[in-house]
């Protein structure tokens, strides 16, 4: 049985007077028929699975287009955009994955070329902004590569219809939206509506508590879960170690879902899970939009056994923003993949 879930964001995510709680991703059914546009979607080969799901969710508004991805003998890209004449005056998008530095140059070459082929408009879909954690300078000499990548993206040429749109999901630091120049139009979307819909489908949906592994995650996401009880953890130093401790909230007897934007080694999430289990949580699950998992660190996460939260995670939800991770964890407990296909298909209508 596949653990890959394709969910469409709900129109309403709870009765609340705070509009922010609704995490307002655009949805296809909110776009008037008279404003819907047909889009040609190019994609990096690693993103083919997600690209095809976007087409399935698009109600016929998205069509796949092809690029020949080859290399010369010296290893540099040998690229060719098929049907370059046919894409003139069309709405064109490119689905990118900057998962390693070595694949960025060839994709930037395509990203810079497509708007110059007389297309009507151009949209870059970059679900995971990979340098987001390098967003500040703490000591003179530090290089904030988040700003570097934002500048590279900000130099996408104008299309006939104007600046390129850039779609990014759950960028790591909220201030990074201001790193982009005026030559592009960034659209910052979120995977949280997909998680909220999945939580509503659980048998114990009424027993969910949201946990944040640190205060940064709480500041980032708490307004999107204003209708859920919450637990806040914090990291404290004990000599050379950083220990996760409970700051506030009551996990006892609850199905606690840890929420963060991304995971790398997973050490903090595992420490948080252990803490919550010792505090009496019935089950512990986790959600991150971006399952980066370098060096197959996803193997550290075990599913629940017969002892509930004591054994491991009941669910670990990620999105398909990192294609290699999706390939590795599909059909492997406790992982489930919530597809970004529907919100991307809707974002292409903006």
Image: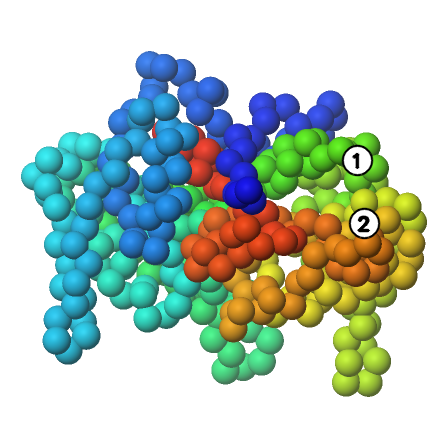
User: Where residue 28 sits in the image (x, y, percent)?
Assistant: 44, 24
Residue 333 vs residue 105, the one in the foreground: 333
Classify mark 2: helix, strand or loop. Answer: strand
Identify the residue at horizontal 55%, vertical 65% (top origin). 293
Q: Alpha-carbon distance for marks 2 and 1? A: 10 Å
Q: Which residue is mark 2?
A: 283
Q: Residue furthest left?
A: 85
Q: Residue furthest bottom?
A: 239
Residue 338 vs residue 148, the one in the foreground: 338
Q: Which residue is mark 1?
A: 204
Residue 5 vs residue 279, the one in the foreground: 5
Identify the residue at horizontal 30%, vertical 53% (top origin). 44
User: Where residue 279 sits in the image (x, y, percent)?
Assistant: 91, 57
Q: Residues within 10 Å of mark 1 (few under 14, many from 20)?
A: few
- Does any portion of residue 177 appear in the rendered image? no
User: Where residue 239 sits in the image (x, y, percent)?
Assistant: 82, 85
């Amino acid at each position: 049985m596949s653990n890959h879930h394709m969910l469409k964001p709900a129109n309403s995510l709870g009765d609340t007077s705070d509009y922010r709680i609704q995490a307002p991703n655009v949805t296809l059914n909110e776009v008037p028929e008279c404003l819907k546009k047909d889009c040609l979607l190019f994609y990096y080969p690693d993103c083919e699975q997600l690209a095809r799901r976007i087409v399935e969710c698009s109600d016929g508004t998205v069509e796949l287009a092809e690029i020949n991805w080859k290399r010369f003998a010296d290893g540099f890209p040998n690229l060719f955009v098929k049907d370059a004449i046919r894409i003139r005056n069309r709405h064109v998008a490119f689905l990118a994955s900057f998962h390693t530095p070595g694949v960025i140059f060839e994709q930037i070459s395509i990203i810079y070329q497509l708007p110059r082929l007389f297309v009507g408009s151009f949209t870059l879909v970059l679900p995971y902004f990979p340098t987001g954690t390098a967003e500040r300078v703490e000591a003179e000499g530090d290089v904030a590569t988040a700003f570097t990548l934002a500048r590279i993206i900000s130099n996408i040429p104008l299309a006939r219809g104007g600046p390129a749109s850039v779609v990014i999901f759950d960028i790591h630091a909220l201030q990074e939206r201001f790193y982009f120049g005026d030559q592009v139009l960034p659209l910052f979307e979120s995977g949280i509506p997909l998680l909220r819909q999945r939580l509503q489908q659980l048998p114990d949906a009424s027993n969910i508590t949201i946990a944040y592994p640190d205060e940064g995650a709480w500041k980032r996401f708490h307004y999107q879960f204003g209708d859920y009880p919450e637990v806040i953890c914090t990291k404290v130093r004990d000599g050379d170690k950083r220990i996760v401790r409970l700051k506030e909230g009551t996990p006892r007897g609850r199905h606690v879902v840890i929420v963060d934007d991304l995971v790398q080694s997973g050490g903090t999430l595992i420490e948080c899970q252990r803490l919550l289990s010792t505090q009496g949580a019935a089950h512990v699950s986790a959600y991150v939009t971006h399952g980066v998992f370098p060096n197959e660190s996803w193997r550290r996460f075990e599913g629940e056994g017969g002892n509930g939260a004591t054994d491991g995670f009941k669910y670990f939800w990620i999105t398909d923003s990192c294609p290699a991770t999706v390939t590795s964890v599909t059909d492997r407990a406790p992982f489930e993949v919530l597809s970004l296909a529907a919100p991307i298909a809707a974002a292409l209508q903006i």
